[in-house]
Amino acid sequence: MKSINDINEFYELTEQPKPILLDFYADWCGPCQTLMPTIEKISHEFQHDIEVRKVNVDQNSELTAKFGVKSIPSLFFLKGKEIIDKTVGLVSTNTITEKINQIIS
C-alpha cells in the first residue's frame, strides 16, 4: 500500500478519476496497527475501484492539519478533493466496505 509523503502528492492524487481512501495513522498507535491488515486487504480487494493511501501523521503534519485530524486512526473517503465520509477510531471491515461501496456506486 502506498503512502502520501507530502501535500503535493495528495493534490496529484486528487487529479485522477478514482475515489480515494486516506488512512491517517502513526507507527506508535496500537489501534492503527490493528487496523492496518484490514486496510491492506481492502486496498487489494478494491484496487480497481478506489485509491488507498496511508498518511503518517508524524511525517505529514501539513496534510494532517488540512484534514483536521485530532485522533487516529482516521479514515477519509474522498471523490476528488471533496470529503464524502470519514471514520475515527477502530472500525470493522464491514463498515469500511459499506462506505467504499457507497462511494463507488
Image (spheres, rainbow, N blue to C red):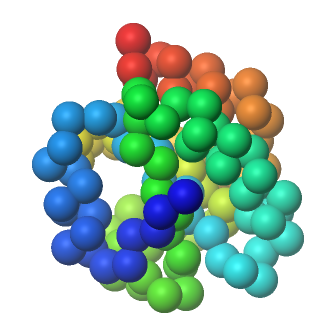
* The one of 86 and 4 positioned closer to us in this rendering: 4
Q: Residue at x 26, y 69 (%)?
A: 9
- Furthest toward the top, the residue is 105
Question: Whole-percent x and y of residue 33?
Answer: 79, 66
Question: Whole-percent x and y of residue 71?
Answer: 64, 66
State the image quarter where residue 44 is shown. top right
Q: Residue at x 55, y 87 (%)?
A: 58
Question: Whole-percent x and y of residue 47?
Answer: 48, 36
* The one of 22 and 37 positioned closer to us in this rendering: 37
Residue 79 can be seen in this image: yes
State the image quarter where residue 105 is shown. top left
Q: Residue at x 62, y 69 (%)?
A: 25
Question: Whole-percent x and y of residue 38?
Answer: 74, 45
Residue 65 can be seen in this image: no
- Furthest toward the left, the residue is 15
- Quadrant location of the N terminus? bottom right
Number of marks in picture = 0
Residue 63's place in the image compared with 79, above or below, is: below
